[in-house]
Protein backbone atom coordinates (compact mmCIF):
# COMPACT_ATOMS: atom_id res chain seq x y z
CA UNK A 1 0.00 0.00 0.00
CA UNK A 2 1.26 3.49 -0.87
CA UNK A 3 2.41 5.68 2.04
CA UNK A 4 -0.27 8.31 1.40
CA UNK A 5 -2.88 5.59 1.31
CA UNK A 6 -1.65 4.24 4.64
CA UNK A 7 -1.95 7.70 6.16
CA UNK A 8 -5.46 8.10 4.80
CA UNK A 9 -6.39 4.68 6.15
CA UNK A 10 -5.47 5.82 9.67
CA UNK A 11 -8.20 8.50 9.54
CA UNK A 12 -10.79 6.80 7.30
CA UNK A 13 -10.59 3.06 6.45
CA UNK A 14 -9.94 2.67 2.75
CA UNK A 15 -12.00 -0.52 2.84
CA UNK A 16 -15.07 1.71 3.32
CA UNK A 17 -14.44 3.31 -0.08
CA UNK A 18 -17.35 1.55 -1.81
CA UNK A 19 -19.73 2.65 0.94
CA UNK A 20 -18.36 6.23 0.79
CA UNK A 21 -18.69 6.31 -2.99
CA UNK A 22 -22.32 5.26 -2.75
CA UNK A 23 -23.04 7.95 -0.14
CA UNK A 24 -21.32 10.69 -2.16
CA UNK A 25 -22.96 9.54 -5.36
CA UNK A 26 -26.35 9.50 -3.64
CA UNK A 27 -25.93 13.13 -2.53
CA UNK A 28 -24.86 14.25 -6.02
CA UNK A 29 -27.74 12.38 -7.63
CA UNK A 30 -30.16 13.84 -5.09
CA UNK A 31 -28.89 17.36 -5.89
CA UNK A 32 -29.35 16.69 -9.62
CA UNK A 33 -32.85 15.38 -8.95
CA UNK A 34 -33.85 18.45 -6.97
CA UNK A 35 -32.10 21.00 -9.16
CA UNK A 36 -32.62 19.56 -12.62
CA UNK A 37 -35.34 16.91 -12.07
CA UNK A 38 -32.97 14.23 -13.32
CA UNK A 39 -31.28 11.29 -11.64
CA UNK A 40 -34.11 10.35 -9.27
CA UNK A 41 -33.85 6.62 -9.92
CA UNK A 42 -30.07 6.70 -9.48
CA UNK A 43 -30.44 8.60 -6.21
CA UNK A 44 -32.85 5.98 -4.84
CA UNK A 45 -30.56 3.12 -5.86
CA UNK A 46 -27.53 4.75 -4.26
CA UNK A 47 -29.57 5.54 -1.15
CA UNK A 48 -30.48 1.87 -0.87
CA UNK A 49 -26.81 0.88 -1.23
CA UNK A 50 -25.78 3.44 1.38
CA UNK A 51 -28.33 2.05 3.83
CA UNK A 52 -27.13 -1.46 2.98
CA UNK A 53 -23.59 -0.37 3.89
CA UNK A 54 -24.88 0.97 7.22
CA UNK A 55 -26.62 -2.35 7.87
CA UNK A 56 -23.42 -4.25 6.95
CA UNK A 57 -21.38 -2.40 9.57
CA UNK A 58 -23.96 -3.07 12.29
CA UNK A 59 -24.79 -6.73 11.65
CA UNK A 60 -22.87 -9.40 13.60
CA UNK A 61 -23.14 -12.54 11.44
CA UNK A 62 -20.44 -11.80 8.85
CA UNK A 63 -17.10 -10.27 9.83
CA UNK A 64 -16.19 -9.65 6.20
CA UNK A 65 -19.31 -7.52 5.70
CA UNK A 66 -18.58 -5.45 8.80
CA UNK A 67 -15.06 -4.69 7.58
CA UNK A 68 -15.94 -4.32 3.90
CA UNK A 69 -19.47 -2.91 3.65
CA UNK A 70 -21.08 -3.25 0.23
CA UNK A 71 -17.93 -4.50 -1.54
CA UNK A 72 -18.03 -7.80 0.39
CA UNK A 73 -21.33 -8.61 -1.35
CA UNK A 74 -19.37 -8.89 -4.59
CA UNK A 75 -17.26 -11.58 -2.95
CA UNK A 76 -20.36 -13.50 -1.90
CA UNK A 77 -21.81 -13.20 -5.41
CA UNK A 78 -18.61 -14.51 -7.03
CA UNK A 79 -18.46 -17.31 -4.46
CA UNK A 80 -22.05 -18.24 -5.32
CA UNK A 81 -21.39 -18.55 -9.04
CA UNK A 82 -17.90 -20.06 -8.68
CA UNK A 83 -18.99 -23.66 -9.50
CA UNK A 84 -20.76 -22.48 -12.66
CA UNK A 85 -17.77 -20.35 -13.70
CA UNK A 86 -15.43 -23.32 -13.27
CA UNK A 87 -17.76 -25.68 -15.11
CA UNK A 88 -18.43 -23.42 -18.08
CA UNK A 89 -15.14 -21.60 -18.53
CA UNK A 90 -12.20 -23.26 -16.80
CA UNK A 91 -12.49 -27.02 -16.39
CA UNK A 92 -11.15 -29.25 -19.16
CA UNK A 93 -12.96 -32.18 -20.75
CA UNK A 94 -11.43 -34.55 -18.19
CA UNK A 95 -11.97 -32.27 -15.18
CA UNK A 96 -15.07 -31.96 -13.06
CA UNK A 97 -16.18 -33.99 -10.09
CA UNK A 98 -17.78 -36.34 -9.43
CA UNK A 99 -18.22 -36.75 -13.21
CA UNK A 100 -16.04 -35.12 -15.83
CA UNK A 101 -17.42 -32.96 -18.60
CA UNK A 102 -16.49 -35.66 -21.10
CA UNK A 103 -18.45 -38.32 -19.20
CA UNK A 104 -21.50 -36.09 -18.93
CA UNK A 105 -21.26 -35.18 -22.60
CA UNK A 106 -21.37 -38.84 -23.65
CA UNK A 107 -24.59 -39.37 -21.69
CA UNK A 108 -26.17 -36.22 -23.13
CA UNK A 109 -25.20 -37.21 -26.67
CA UNK A 110 -26.52 -40.75 -26.34
CA UNK A 111 -29.72 -39.55 -24.69
CA UNK A 112 -30.32 -37.08 -27.54
CA UNK A 113 -29.21 -39.57 -30.23
CA UNK A 114 -26.40 -37.25 -31.26
CA UNK A 115 -22.97 -38.28 -32.51
CA UNK A 116 -21.04 -39.64 -29.53
CA UNK A 117 -17.78 -40.42 -31.31
CA UNK A 118 -14.48 -38.70 -30.47
CA UNK A 119 -11.94 -37.44 -33.05
CA UNK A 120 -8.14 -37.35 -33.08
CA UNK A 121 -7.44 -40.05 -30.52
CA UNK A 122 -7.80 -40.39 -26.79
CA UNK A 123 -7.31 -37.52 -24.37
CA UNK A 124 -6.46 -40.00 -21.63
CA UNK A 125 -2.87 -40.35 -20.47
CA UNK A 126 -2.38 -44.02 -21.37
CA UNK A 127 0.88 -44.10 -19.41
CA UNK A 128 -0.65 -42.85 -16.16
CA UNK A 129 -0.90 -45.28 -13.27
CA UNK A 130 -4.49 -46.47 -13.07
CA UNK A 131 -5.22 -46.35 -16.80
CA UNK A 132 -7.28 -49.41 -17.85
CA UNK A 133 -8.36 -51.09 -21.05
CA UNK A 134 -10.07 -54.26 -22.24
CA UNK A 135 -8.11 -56.71 -24.39
CA UNK A 136 -9.57 -57.31 -27.84
CA UNK A 137 -9.54 -60.39 -30.04
CA UNK A 138 -8.22 -60.92 -33.56
CA UNK A 139 -11.41 -62.92 -34.12
CA UNK A 140 -14.24 -60.63 -32.98
CA UNK A 141 -17.66 -62.16 -32.48
CA UNK A 142 -20.87 -60.99 -34.14
CA UNK A 143 -23.93 -60.62 -31.91
CA UNK A 144 -27.49 -60.22 -33.13
CA UNK A 145 -28.70 -58.07 -30.23
CA UNK A 146 -27.60 -55.75 -27.47
CA UNK A 147 -30.54 -56.72 -25.27
CA UNK A 148 -28.41 -58.54 -22.71
CA UNK A 149 -30.35 -60.13 -19.84
CA UNK A 150 -29.81 -62.11 -16.66
CA UNK A 151 -32.39 -64.32 -14.92
CA UNK A 152 -32.85 -63.49 -11.24
CA UNK A 153 -34.69 -65.93 -8.99
CA UNK A 154 -34.43 -68.95 -11.27
CA UNK A 155 -36.53 -71.74 -9.78
CA UNK A 156 -38.82 -69.32 -7.92
CA UNK A 157 -42.50 -68.93 -8.73
CA UNK A 158 -41.94 -65.61 -10.54
CA UNK A 159 -38.32 -65.23 -11.75
CA UNK A 160 -37.35 -61.99 -13.44
CA UNK A 161 -35.43 -61.71 -16.70
CA UNK A 162 -33.61 -58.44 -16.02
CA UNK A 163 -31.57 -56.20 -18.26
CA UNK A 164 -27.90 -55.97 -17.33
CA UNK A 165 -28.34 -52.18 -17.00
CA UNK A 166 -31.09 -50.70 -14.83
CA UNK A 167 -32.11 -47.54 -12.97
CA UNK A 168 -30.67 -47.46 -9.45
CA UNK A 169 -32.55 -46.53 -6.28
CA UNK A 170 -33.86 -42.95 -6.17
CA UNK A 171 -36.96 -42.13 -4.14
CA UNK A 172 -39.90 -39.96 -5.08
CA UNK A 173 -39.36 -36.98 -2.81
CA UNK A 174 -35.68 -36.90 -3.60
CA UNK A 175 -36.69 -36.88 -7.28
CA UNK A 176 -39.53 -34.79 -8.66
CA UNK A 177 -42.77 -36.33 -9.88
CA UNK A 178 -41.88 -35.56 -13.50
CA UNK A 179 -38.46 -37.19 -13.10
CA UNK A 180 -40.04 -40.39 -11.74
CA UNK A 181 -42.62 -40.41 -14.52
CA UNK A 182 -39.96 -39.99 -17.22
CA UNK A 183 -37.65 -42.64 -15.73
CA UNK A 184 -40.45 -45.18 -15.44
CA UNK A 185 -41.78 -44.54 -18.93
CA UNK A 186 -38.27 -44.94 -20.34
CA UNK A 187 -37.89 -48.20 -18.39
CA UNK A 188 -41.24 -49.43 -19.73
CA UNK A 189 -40.30 -48.73 -23.34
CA UNK A 190 -36.87 -50.31 -22.97
CA UNK A 191 -37.90 -53.31 -20.88
CA UNK A 192 -35.50 -52.58 -18.03
CA UNK A 193 -36.05 -52.11 -14.30
CA UNK A 194 -36.62 -49.00 -12.22
CA UNK A 195 -35.66 -49.19 -8.53
CA UNK A 196 -38.09 -47.19 -6.39
CA UNK A 197 -35.62 -46.21 -3.68
CA UNK A 198 -36.70 -46.56 -0.06
CA UNK A 199 -39.42 -43.91 -0.49
CA UNK A 200 -41.67 -46.74 -1.76
CA UNK A 201 -44.05 -46.91 -4.71
CA UNK A 202 -45.71 -43.61 -5.50
CA UNK A 203 -48.58 -42.93 -7.87
CA UNK A 204 -45.94 -41.66 -10.32
CA UNK A 205 -44.16 -45.03 -10.30
CA UNK A 206 -47.47 -46.71 -11.13
CA UNK A 207 -48.65 -44.32 -13.82
CA UNK A 208 -46.73 -45.73 -16.79
CA UNK A 209 -46.38 -49.39 -15.81
CA UNK A 210 -42.60 -49.81 -16.07
CA UNK A 211 -40.97 -52.72 -14.22
CA UNK A 212 -40.23 -51.89 -10.59
CA UNK A 213 -37.73 -53.13 -8.04
CA UNK A 214 -39.36 -52.24 -4.73
CA UNK A 215 -36.74 -51.18 -2.22
CA UNK A 216 -37.64 -51.47 1.46
CA UNK A 217 -35.53 -49.56 3.96
CA UNK A 218 -35.52 -49.36 7.74
CA UNK A 219 -38.53 -47.03 7.70
CA UNK A 220 -40.63 -49.74 5.97
CA UNK A 221 -42.27 -47.08 3.82
CA UNK A 222 -45.24 -48.51 1.96
CA UNK A 223 -45.40 -51.49 4.33
CA UNK A 224 -45.53 -50.07 7.84
CA UNK A 225 -47.83 -49.71 10.81
CA UNK A 226 -48.39 -46.31 12.36
CA UNK A 227 -45.57 -46.90 14.83
CA UNK A 228 -43.08 -47.58 12.02
CA UNK A 229 -42.98 -51.37 12.39
CA UNK A 230 -43.34 -53.76 9.46
CA UNK A 231 -46.87 -54.50 8.22
CA UNK A 232 -47.54 -57.76 6.35
CA UNK A 233 -50.87 -56.52 5.02
CA UNK A 234 -49.45 -53.35 3.49
CA UNK A 235 -46.48 -55.30 2.13
CA UNK A 236 -48.70 -57.81 0.33
CA UNK A 237 -50.73 -54.99 -1.25
CA UNK A 238 -47.65 -53.54 -2.93
CA UNK A 239 -45.45 -56.61 -3.41
CA UNK A 240 -48.07 -58.47 -5.40
CA UNK A 241 -48.63 -55.67 -7.87
CA UNK A 242 -47.83 -57.10 -11.34
CA UNK A 243 -45.56 -54.10 -11.93
CA UNK A 244 -43.30 -55.08 -8.99
CA UNK A 245 -40.80 -57.63 -10.29
CA UNK A 246 -38.36 -57.87 -7.35
CA UNK A 247 -38.20 -56.92 -3.67
CA UNK A 248 -34.97 -55.42 -2.30
CA UNK A 249 -34.27 -55.02 1.41
CA UNK A 250 -31.91 -52.07 1.94
CA UNK A 251 -29.38 -52.61 4.71
CA UNK A 252 -27.20 -49.63 3.79
CA UNK A 253 -26.44 -47.34 0.86
CA UNK A 254 -23.23 -46.03 -0.61
CA UNK A 255 -23.97 -42.34 -0.04
CA UNK A 256 -24.29 -42.59 3.74
CA UNK A 257 -23.91 -46.15 5.03
CA UNK A 258 -24.81 -46.61 8.68
CA UNK A 259 -26.72 -43.31 8.72
CA UNK A 260 -30.47 -42.87 9.02
CA UNK A 261 -32.36 -39.90 7.71
CA UNK A 262 -35.19 -37.46 8.38
CA UNK A 263 -37.46 -35.86 5.81
CA UNK A 264 -38.71 -32.74 7.68
CA UNK A 265 -42.46 -32.46 8.14
CA UNK A 266 -42.92 -29.41 5.87
CA UNK A 267 -41.53 -31.45 2.97
CA UNK A 268 -43.91 -34.39 3.56
CA UNK A 269 -46.56 -33.53 0.99
CA UNK A 270 -49.80 -35.45 0.47
CA UNK A 271 -48.24 -37.41 -2.41
CA UNK A 272 -45.12 -38.36 -0.41
CA UNK A 273 -47.26 -39.28 2.61
CA UNK A 274 -49.47 -41.46 0.43
CA UNK A 275 -46.49 -43.37 -0.98
CA UNK A 276 -44.71 -43.82 2.32
CA UNK A 277 -47.71 -44.46 4.54
CA UNK A 278 -46.96 -41.61 6.94
CA UNK A 279 -49.01 -38.59 8.09
CA UNK A 280 -48.88 -35.42 6.02
CA UNK A 281 -46.66 -32.70 7.46
CA UNK A 282 -44.91 -34.78 10.12
CA UNK A 283 -41.23 -35.75 10.21
CA UNK A 284 -40.58 -38.89 8.17
CA UNK A 285 -37.82 -40.86 9.90
CA UNK A 286 -35.58 -43.57 8.44
CA UNK A 287 -33.84 -45.26 11.40
CA UNK A 288 -30.21 -46.25 11.03
CA UNK A 289 -31.08 -49.91 11.70
CA UNK A 290 -33.97 -52.30 11.01
CA UNK A 291 -36.50 -53.21 13.70
CA UNK A 292 -37.79 -56.38 12.00
CA UNK A 293 -34.61 -58.33 12.75
CA UNK A 294 -31.49 -58.10 14.89
CA UNK A 295 -29.26 -60.98 13.79
CA UNK A 296 -28.06 -62.40 10.45
CA UNK A 297 -30.25 -65.49 10.88
CA UNK A 298 -33.30 -63.34 11.63
CA UNK A 299 -32.51 -61.21 8.59
CA UNK A 300 -32.45 -64.20 6.24
CA UNK A 301 -35.68 -65.53 7.72
CA UNK A 302 -37.23 -62.09 7.19
CA UNK A 303 -36.11 -62.15 3.53
CA UNK A 304 -37.58 -65.64 3.15
CA UNK A 305 -40.81 -64.38 4.67
CA UNK A 306 -40.90 -61.42 2.27
CA UNK A 307 -40.37 -63.78 -0.66
CA UNK A 308 -43.35 -65.92 0.39
CA UNK A 309 -45.57 -62.89 1.00
CA UNK A 310 -44.61 -61.52 -2.44
CA UNK A 311 -45.78 -64.71 -4.13
CA UNK A 312 -42.35 -66.08 -4.92
CA UNK A 313 -40.89 -62.99 -6.56
CA UNK A 314 -37.07 -62.64 -6.41
CA UNK A 315 -36.11 -61.14 -3.07
CA UNK A 316 -32.69 -60.01 -1.88
CA UNK A 317 -30.86 -57.19 -0.18
CA UNK A 318 -28.62 -54.21 -0.86
CA UNK A 319 -25.65 -53.13 1.20
CA UNK A 320 -22.48 -51.10 1.19
CA UNK A 321 -19.72 -53.18 2.75
CA UNK A 322 -18.54 -51.95 6.14
CA UNK A 323 -17.21 -54.28 8.86
CA UNK A 324 -16.16 -57.44 6.96
CA UNK A 325 -17.22 -59.70 9.84
CA UNK A 326 -20.83 -58.49 9.48
CA UNK A 327 -20.94 -59.56 5.84
CA UNK A 328 -19.25 -62.84 6.76
CA UNK A 329 -21.87 -63.31 9.50
CA UNK A 330 -24.60 -63.10 6.84
CA UNK A 331 -22.70 -65.61 4.71
CA UNK A 332 -22.37 -68.01 7.67
CA UNK A 333 -26.10 -67.60 8.35
CA UNK A 334 -26.78 -68.69 4.76
CA UNK A 335 -24.85 -71.89 5.42
CA UNK A 336 -26.53 -72.51 8.77
CA UNK A 337 -30.12 -71.87 7.67
CA UNK A 338 -29.94 -72.96 4.05
CA UNK A 339 -31.74 -69.71 3.17
CA UNK A 340 -30.14 -67.67 0.42
CA UNK A 341 -31.31 -64.41 -1.10
CA UNK A 342 -32.06 -64.46 -4.81
CA UNK A 343 -29.79 -61.48 -5.30
CA UNK A 344 -27.43 -59.10 -3.53
CA UNK A 345 -26.81 -55.54 -4.72
CA UNK A 346 -23.45 -54.10 -3.69
CA UNK A 347 -23.48 -50.32 -3.40
CA UNK A 348 -20.11 -48.60 -3.61
CA UNK A 349 -19.25 -45.71 -1.31
CA UNK A 350 -18.67 -43.54 -4.40
CA UNK A 351 -22.41 -43.73 -5.11
CA UNK A 352 -25.06 -41.29 -3.96
CA UNK A 353 -27.55 -38.88 -5.49
CA UNK A 354 -29.02 -37.10 -2.47
CA UNK A 355 -27.54 -35.14 0.38
CA UNK A 356 -25.23 -36.74 2.93
CA UNK A 357 -22.82 -35.45 5.58
CA UNK A 358 -19.39 -34.72 4.12
CA UNK A 359 -17.64 -37.23 6.36
CA UNK A 360 -19.97 -40.00 5.21
CA UNK A 361 -19.68 -39.03 1.55
CA UNK A 362 -15.89 -39.01 1.67
CA UNK A 363 -14.84 -41.44 4.37
CA UNK A 364 -17.46 -44.10 5.22
CA UNK A 365 -18.04 -47.38 3.41
CA UNK A 366 -16.06 -49.54 1.01
CA UNK A 367 -15.70 -48.42 -2.63
CA UNK A 368 -17.45 -50.58 -5.23
CA UNK A 369 -14.38 -52.53 -6.33
CA UNK A 370 -13.52 -53.73 -2.83
CA UNK A 371 -17.12 -54.36 -1.79
CA UNK A 372 -18.11 -56.19 -4.95
CA UNK A 373 -14.98 -58.32 -4.94
CA UNK A 374 -15.47 -59.33 -1.31
CA UNK A 375 -19.09 -60.37 -1.85
CA UNK A 376 -18.28 -62.25 -5.05
CA UNK A 377 -15.28 -64.03 -3.53
CA UNK A 378 -17.19 -65.06 -0.42
CA UNK A 379 -20.05 -66.56 -2.42
CA UNK A 380 -17.60 -68.37 -4.70
CA UNK A 381 -15.68 -69.72 -1.72
CA UNK A 382 -18.91 -71.09 -0.23
CA UNK A 383 -20.17 -72.57 -3.52
CA UNK A 384 -23.17 -70.23 -3.37
CA UNK A 385 -22.33 -68.02 -6.33
CA UNK A 386 -24.50 -69.92 -8.80
CA UNK A 387 -27.53 -69.53 -6.53
CA UNK A 388 -27.17 -65.80 -5.84
CA UNK A 389 -27.15 -63.11 -8.50
CA UNK A 390 -25.03 -60.04 -7.76
CA UNK A 391 -25.85 -56.52 -8.88
CA UNK A 392 -23.82 -53.38 -8.25
CA UNK A 393 -24.00 -49.60 -8.27
CA UNK A 394 -21.46 -46.82 -7.89
CA UNK A 395 -20.49 -44.35 -10.66
CA UNK A 396 -21.50 -46.79 -13.40
CA UNK A 397 -22.19 -44.64 -16.46
CA UNK A 398 -20.51 -46.07 -19.58
CA UNK A 399 -20.30 -49.46 -21.28
CA UNK A 400 -16.73 -49.87 -20.03
CA UNK A 401 -17.95 -49.25 -16.47
CA UNK A 402 -20.43 -52.11 -16.92
CA UNK A 403 -17.79 -54.39 -18.45
CA UNK A 404 -15.35 -53.70 -15.63
CA UNK A 405 -17.96 -54.38 -12.94
CA UNK A 406 -18.84 -57.67 -14.60
CA UNK A 407 -15.17 -58.59 -14.69
CA UNK A 408 -15.15 -58.18 -10.90
CA UNK A 409 -18.15 -60.46 -10.45
CA UNK A 410 -21.33 -58.48 -11.10
CA UNK A 411 -24.23 -60.00 -13.04
CA UNK A 412 -25.84 -56.63 -13.72
CA UNK A 413 -25.31 -52.94 -13.00
CA UNK A 414 -27.52 -50.11 -11.78
CA UNK A 415 -27.00 -46.41 -12.47
CA UNK A 416 -28.56 -43.40 -10.78
CA UNK A 417 -26.62 -40.30 -11.82
CA UNK A 418 -26.20 -41.56 -15.39
CA UNK A 419 -29.97 -41.63 -15.81
CA UNK A 420 -30.22 -38.27 -14.06
CA UNK A 421 -27.92 -36.86 -16.76
CA UNK A 422 -30.23 -38.41 -19.36
CA UNK A 423 -33.09 -36.47 -17.74
CA UNK A 424 -31.10 -33.26 -18.17
CA UNK A 425 -29.18 -32.99 -14.87
CA UNK A 426 -26.24 -30.57 -15.31
CA UNK A 427 -24.38 -31.57 -12.12
CA UNK A 428 -25.27 -28.29 -10.41
CA UNK A 429 -25.01 -30.22 -7.12
CA UNK A 430 -28.00 -28.43 -5.63
CA UNK A 431 -30.06 -31.62 -5.22
CA UNK A 432 -30.54 -31.05 -1.48
CA UNK A 433 -31.66 -27.43 -1.73
CA UNK A 434 -34.93 -27.81 -3.63
CA UNK A 435 -33.54 -25.42 -6.25
CA UNK A 436 -32.56 -27.93 -8.94
CA UNK A 437 -32.21 -25.88 -12.15
CA UNK A 438 -33.49 -28.69 -14.38
CA UNK A 439 -36.46 -29.91 -12.32
CA UNK A 440 -34.96 -33.35 -11.59
CA UNK A 441 -34.55 -33.15 -7.80
CA UNK A 442 -37.11 -30.63 -6.62
CA UNK A 443 -40.69 -30.60 -5.38
CA UNK A 444 -41.17 -27.03 -6.64
CA UNK A 445 -44.05 -27.39 -9.12
CA UNK A 446 -42.84 -24.54 -11.32
CA UNK A 447 -39.25 -25.81 -11.47
CA UNK A 448 -40.19 -29.41 -12.24
CA UNK A 449 -42.59 -28.29 -14.97
CA UNK A 450 -39.48 -27.54 -17.04
CA UNK A 451 -38.86 -31.32 -17.22
CA UNK A 452 -41.04 -32.47 -20.13
CA UNK A 453 -41.97 -36.09 -19.44
CA UNK A 454 -42.40 -37.45 -23.01
CA UNK A 455 -39.15 -35.87 -24.20
CA UNK A 456 -37.10 -37.00 -21.21
CA UNK A 457 -38.60 -40.51 -21.21
CA UNK A 458 -37.34 -40.94 -24.78
CA UNK A 459 -33.91 -39.72 -23.71
CA UNK A 460 -33.82 -42.21 -20.83
CA UNK A 461 -34.61 -44.96 -23.31
CA UNK A 462 -32.02 -43.68 -25.79
CA UNK A 463 -29.28 -43.56 -23.16
CA UNK A 464 -30.04 -47.10 -22.03
CA UNK A 465 -30.13 -48.48 -25.56
CA UNK A 466 -27.04 -46.66 -26.80
CA UNK A 467 -25.02 -47.68 -23.74
CA UNK A 468 -25.97 -51.33 -24.27
CA UNK A 469 -25.13 -50.99 -27.95
CA UNK A 470 -21.67 -49.74 -26.93
CA UNK A 471 -21.42 -52.70 -24.54
CA UNK A 472 -22.31 -55.01 -27.42
CA UNK A 473 -19.42 -53.59 -29.43
CA UNK A 474 -17.02 -54.12 -26.53
CA UNK A 475 -18.17 -57.72 -26.10
CA UNK A 476 -17.78 -58.35 -29.82
CA UNK A 477 -14.32 -56.77 -29.88
CA UNK A 478 -13.27 -59.12 -27.09
CA UNK A 479 -14.52 -62.11 -29.08
CA UNK A 480 -17.23 -62.98 -26.54
CA UNK A 481 -20.93 -63.75 -26.79
CA UNK A 482 -22.35 -62.14 -23.64
CA UNK A 483 -21.12 -59.60 -21.08
CA UNK A 484 -21.24 -62.33 -18.43
CA UNK A 485 -18.20 -63.87 -20.15
CA UNK A 486 -16.06 -60.83 -19.36
CA UNK A 487 -13.59 -61.77 -16.66
CA UNK A 488 -10.75 -60.12 -14.77
CA UNK A 489 -8.42 -61.66 -17.37
CA UNK A 490 -9.86 -59.33 -20.00
CA UNK A 491 -9.15 -56.05 -18.17
CA UNK A 492 -5.62 -54.62 -17.99
CA UNK A 493 -4.49 -51.94 -15.55
CA UNK A 494 -1.31 -49.90 -15.53
CA UNK A 495 0.00 -50.32 -11.99
CA UNK A 496 3.39 -48.64 -12.48
CA UNK A 497 5.05 -46.27 -14.91
CA UNK A 498 6.53 -49.18 -16.85
CA UNK A 499 4.28 -52.03 -15.77
CA UNK A 500 0.81 -53.39 -16.41
CA UNK A 501 -1.15 -56.30 -14.97
CA UNK A 502 -4.38 -58.12 -15.66
CA UNK A 503 -6.96 -57.50 -12.96
CA UNK A 504 -6.93 -61.29 -12.53
CA UNK A 505 -3.31 -61.04 -11.36
CA UNK A 506 -3.62 -57.72 -9.57
CA UNK A 507 -6.73 -58.37 -7.47
CA UNK A 508 -7.40 -61.30 -5.10
CA UNK A 509 -9.79 -63.99 -6.32
CA UNK A 510 -10.99 -67.11 -4.49
CA UNK A 511 -11.27 -70.65 -5.85
CA UNK A 512 -14.72 -72.31 -5.75
CA UNK A 513 -15.38 -74.01 -2.41
CA UNK A 514 -12.17 -72.73 -0.82
CA UNK A 515 -13.88 -71.45 2.33
CA UNK A 516 -15.85 -74.66 2.74
CA UNK A 517 -12.57 -76.56 2.58
CA UNK A 518 -11.22 -74.45 5.43
CA UNK A 519 -8.83 -72.48 3.29
CA UNK A 520 -8.37 -68.81 4.12
CA UNK A 521 -6.91 -67.61 0.82
CA UNK A 522 -6.50 -63.90 1.61
CA UNK A 523 -5.78 -61.75 4.64
CA UNK A 524 -9.32 -60.39 4.86
CA UNK A 525 -10.63 -63.94 5.33
CA UNK A 526 -7.87 -64.95 7.72
CA UNK A 527 -8.51 -61.89 9.89
CA UNK A 528 -12.28 -61.48 9.85
CA UNK A 529 -13.83 -64.87 9.03
CA UNK A 530 -13.14 -66.22 12.54
CA UNK A 531 -14.77 -63.11 14.02
CA UNK A 532 -18.09 -63.73 12.26
CA UNK A 533 -21.01 -65.60 13.82
CA UNK A 534 -24.35 -66.46 12.25
CA UNK A 535 -26.36 -65.53 15.32
CA UNK A 536 -25.05 -61.99 15.73
CA UNK A 537 -23.74 -59.02 13.80
CA UNK A 538 -21.37 -58.37 16.68
CA UNK A 539 -17.74 -59.43 16.40
CA UNK A 540 -17.00 -62.71 18.13
CA UNK A 541 -14.46 -62.59 20.94
Image (tube, rainbow, N blue to C red):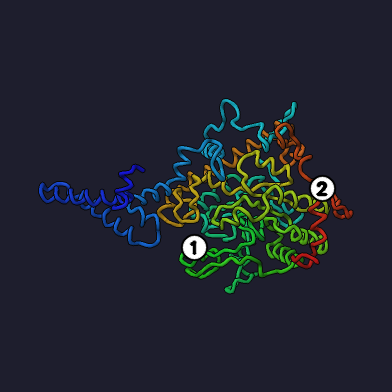
Image coordinates for residue 294, horizontal then vertical, percent: 71, 69
Depth check, front residue: 377 or 116? 377
Q: Residue furthest bottom?
A: 227
> How busy is the neighbourhood of tag 2: few (under 14 within 10 Å), some, or many (20 plus)?
many
In the rendered structure, the answer to whether residue 336 lies left or right of residue 104 reads: right
Q: Which residue is mark 2?
A: 510
Image coordinates for residue 224, horizontal then vertical, percent: 60, 69
In the rendered structure, the answer to whether residue 269 lies left or right of residue 162 reads: left
Measure the alpha-carbon separation of dots 2 and 1.
48 Å
Lower sequence index among marks 2 and 1: 1
Residue that appears at 61% across and 51% down: 351
Quadrant housing the N terminus? top left
> How busy is the neighbourhood of tag 1: few (under 14 within 10 Å), some, or many (20 plus)?
some
Rendered view: 355 above or below 144: below
Depth check, front residue: 297 or 20? 20
Image coordinates for residue 478, horizontal then vertical, percent: 72, 32
Residue that appears at 61% across and 67% down: 287
Residue 314 appears anywhere in the view: yes
Q: Residue furthest left?
A: 35
Quadrant housing the C terminus? bottom right
Disc 1 on helix, strand or loop? Answer: helix
Q: Which residue is mark 1?
A: 271
Residue that appears at 74% across and 61% down: 326
| Residue depth check, mark 2 versus mark 1: number of the one nearer the observer | 2
In the rendered structure, the answer to whether residue 39 lies left or right of residue 288 reads: left
Image coordinates for residue 151, horizontal then vertical, percent: 72, 49
Amino acid sequence: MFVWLQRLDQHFPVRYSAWLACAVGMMLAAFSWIAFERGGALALILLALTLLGLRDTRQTRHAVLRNYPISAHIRFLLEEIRPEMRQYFFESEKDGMPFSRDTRAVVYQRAKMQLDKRPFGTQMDVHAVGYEWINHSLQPSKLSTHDFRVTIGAGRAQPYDASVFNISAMSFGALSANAVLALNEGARRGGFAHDTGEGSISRHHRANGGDLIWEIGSGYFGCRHGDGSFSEERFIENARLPQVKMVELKLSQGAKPGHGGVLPGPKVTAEIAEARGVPVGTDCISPSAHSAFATPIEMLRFIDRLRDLAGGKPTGFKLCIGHPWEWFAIAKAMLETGIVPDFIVVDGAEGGTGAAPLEFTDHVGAPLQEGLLLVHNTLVGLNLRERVRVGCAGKVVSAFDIARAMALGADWCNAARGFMFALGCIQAQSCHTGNCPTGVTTQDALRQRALDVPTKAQRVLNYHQQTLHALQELVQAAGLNHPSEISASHIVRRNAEHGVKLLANLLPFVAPGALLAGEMPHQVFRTYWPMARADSFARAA
